[in-house]
Image (cartoon, rainbow, N blue to C red):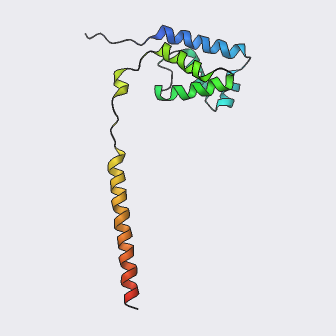
């Protein structure tokens, strides 16, 4: 059996408790914060839970936390820094380069666009010479 790296759940749960406490100190309900940030109540609950399994993907968390901080009257940079310290470094699996699946589609669209422009140009030139 290979030993798997377990996520640092205790610091994330501490962060979630701190986040919830800061919201409650400001007499804000989750629903108010959800309306102010345009985040779902479930997203706010997930952020405040500190449960990594319930949290949104890491790519979204920073933006969500910045919105949360602004709406709750917290410093967005400090909040993100606290989360990054609690979450720890990004797992290696998340850092692999993404495949550029859109590149062949872009090239194909450009080629089709050029061919279409040439075809239209040829039709207009050909139609004007015969009349």
Q: Is residue 43 above or below residue 99?
A: above
Q: Look at 37% across and 20% down and name the residue there.
A: 91
Say whether residue 110 is left or right of residue 34.
left
Q: Look at 74% across and 17% down and name the residue there.
A: 27
Q: Look at 35% across and 73% down and name the residue there.
A: 119
Say whether residue 47 is left or right of residue 33.
left
Q: Is residue 39 above or below residue 87?
A: below
Q: Position of residue 11 (x, y in %)?
A: 50, 9
| Depth order, front residue of 12/128 | 128
| Depth order, front residue of 36/79 | 79
Find the residue positioned furthest to the left. 1
Image quadrant of residue 28? Answer: top right
Find the residue positioned furthest to the right. 27
Say whether residue 57 is left or right of residue 6.
right
Q: Position of residue 116 (x, y in %)?
A: 37, 68
For the image shown, how many numbered marks are present on the structure?
0
Image quadrant of residue 2? Answer: top left
Q: Look at 34% across and 24% down and name the residue there.
A: 93
Work out which quarter of the rendered image holds the N terminus and state it. Answer: top left
Work out which quarter of the rendered image holds the C terminus and state it. Answer: bottom left
Find the residue positioned furthest to the bottom. 131
Q: Is residue 66 above or below residue 18?
A: below
Q: Position of residue 75 (x, y in %)?
A: 63, 21
Q: Position of residue 59 (x, y in %)?
A: 47, 29
């Amino acid at each position: 059996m290979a030993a798997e790296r377990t996520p640092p759940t205790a610091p994330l749960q501490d962060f979630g408790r701190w986040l919830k406490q800061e919201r409650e100190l400001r007499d804000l309900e989750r629903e108010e914060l959800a309306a102010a940030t345009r985040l779902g109540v479930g997203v706010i609950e997930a952020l405040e839970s500190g449960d990594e399994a319930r949290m949104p993907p890491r790519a979204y968390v920073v933006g969500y936390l910045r919105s949360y901080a602004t709406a709750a009257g917290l410093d967005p940079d400090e909040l993100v820094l606290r989360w990054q310290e609690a979450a720890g470094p990004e797992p290696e699996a998340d850092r692999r380069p993404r495949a550029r699946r859109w590149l062949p589609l872009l090239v194909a669209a450009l080629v089709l666009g050029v061919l279409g422009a040439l075809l239209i140009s040829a039709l207009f030139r050909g139609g004007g010479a015969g009349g």
